[in-house]
Image (cartoon, helix red, strand yellow):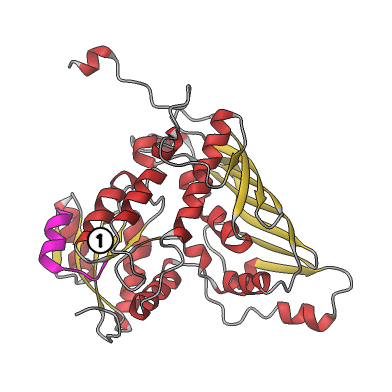
């Protein structure tokens, strides 16, 4: 039976049983299962022991080592992908063709070409299965409150913004073989770490128009960057700076937006509550107006649970989820443009990167010094 208009739980399967699934996806699913919204019917992992252990721990009836076998056997309504980004395209397409909605952990996939291939596998209607991305920072009550005020122009025009993800990752972090590699991690801090703050900035400020980026590999022995910066012009005229780093011992995630009538600030690390937001009115703003801005309502932290609850409601109502389709693509396009600008030393405009552009199929764009080294001849003939 279709989940549309039904009160039955969405039959949900999880692919990948690593740290993010255990820490975030499975606990969120358990809470919604207790409320009758979902029923977790299967997990899949290439490590059979891990799949069986997670299934046993969470009381999940099915444990598989093959995604296709799981899709054929349990026919889920929703597939949650908690797997590495290199397999997201293949797995998303398989789930969509099996008639399931997809909720995919970030990074969504290694390129715009991959994202567009996933979108092409969707049936097309808002009430039919589609793929969405885990961008949970859009779904806390603080973001809902500030987004509503920005879109109603309560703060006046946005003018200047800053988006900062300055974290710290040591050499042991990058000793894991798949990290710091384009093919397996999808990118450096611009793709794997700062993506959440940049997604929230874009969600709050609307479409971006132009980006001028810089990137460097200053500390770590990796293919990707370990720090990047960008200047951004938004379609509405606002200017912004963006900083992404894994070299910063004093870790912080921050967004600041200066508008005509107020400054909005969000300061946190890996997730926020209402108390992490601050709205400072400009001189002359009436006290009652400024006081109303401080009413964020019930405190819902940014979390996988908050987004999953919204996704389930959207699926049931036959609505497009905000992080699916164009709503998810805009962030990947922005990150792709940041890399292209950084590696070509030229500004990149929104909509510029499409089929035929080397950055459409790979974030490194084949740029000298950034593209993966070609295999040595003896390795090619081994």
Which quarter of the picture shows residue 214?
top right
Is residue 192 shown above or below 134? above
Looking at the figure, which quarter contains the N terminus? bottom left
Magenta includes 71? yes
User: Where is residue 308 drawn, in percent x and y?
Assistant: 39, 71
Q: Residue furthest top?
A: 378
- Name which quarter of the figure residue 174 lies in: top left
Residue 246 seen in this snapshot: no
- Residue segment shown in magenta: 66-78
Q: Is residue 16 left or right of residue 295?
A: left
Disc 1 marks which residue? Answer: 96
Check if residue 312 falls in the magenta segment: no
* Residue name at image x 70 percent, y 59 percent: 257
In depth, the one of 8 and 173 nearer the eye is 8
Instruction: Say which residue appears at 61% left-offset and 63% top-offset.
Output: 204
Describe residue 47's horizontal placement relative to residue 107 as left or right.
left
In front here: 183 or 173?
Answer: 183
């Amino acid at each position: 039976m279709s989940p549309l208009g039904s009160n039955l739980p969405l039959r949900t399967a999880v692919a990948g049983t690593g740290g993010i699934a255990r820490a975030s996806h499975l606990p969120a699913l358990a809470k919604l299962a207790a409320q009758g919204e979902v029923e977790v019917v299967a997990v899949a992992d290439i490590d059979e022991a891990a799949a069986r252990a997670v299934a046993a721990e969470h009381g999940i009836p099915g444990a598989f080592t093959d995604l296709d076998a799981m899709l054929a056997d349990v026919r889920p309504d929703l597939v949650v992908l908690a797997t590495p980004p290199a397999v997201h395209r293949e797995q998303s397409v398989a789930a969509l063709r099996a008639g399931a909605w997809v909720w995919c952990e970030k990074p969504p996939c290694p390129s715009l070409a991959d994202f567009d291939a996933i979108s092409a596998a969707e049936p097309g209607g808002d009430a039919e299965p589609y793929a969405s991305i885990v961008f949970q920072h859009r779904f806390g009550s603080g973001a809902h409150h500030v987004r509503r005020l920005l879109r109603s122009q309560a703060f006046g025009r946005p003018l200047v913004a800053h988006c900062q993800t300055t974290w710290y990752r040591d050499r042991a972090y990058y000793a894991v073989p798949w990290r710091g590699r384009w093919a397996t991690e999808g990118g450096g801090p611009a793709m794997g770490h700062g993506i959440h703050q940049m997604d929230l900035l874009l969600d709050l400020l609307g479409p971006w128009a132009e980006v001028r980026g810089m990137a460097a590999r200053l500390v770590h022995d990796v293919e990707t960057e370990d720090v990047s910066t960008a200047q951004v012009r938004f379609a509405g005229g606002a200017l912004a700076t963006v900083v992404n780093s894994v070299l910063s011992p004093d870790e912080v995630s921050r967004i600041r937006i200066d508008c005509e009538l107020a400054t909005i600030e969000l300061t946190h690390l890996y997730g926020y509550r209402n108390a992490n937001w601050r709205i400072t009115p400009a001189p002359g703003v009436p006290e009652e107006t400024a006081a109303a801005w401080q009413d964020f309502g019930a405190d819902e932290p940014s979390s996988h649970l908050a987004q999953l609850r919204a996704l389930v409601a959207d699926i049931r109502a036959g609505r497009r989820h905000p992080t699916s389709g164009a709503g998810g693509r805009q962030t990947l396009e922005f990150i792709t443009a940041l890399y292209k600008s950084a590696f070509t030393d030229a500004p990149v405009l929104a909509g510029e990167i499409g089929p035929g552009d080397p950055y459409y199929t790979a974030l490194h764009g084949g740029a000298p010094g950034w593209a993966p080294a070609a295999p040595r001849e003896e390795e090619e003939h081994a």
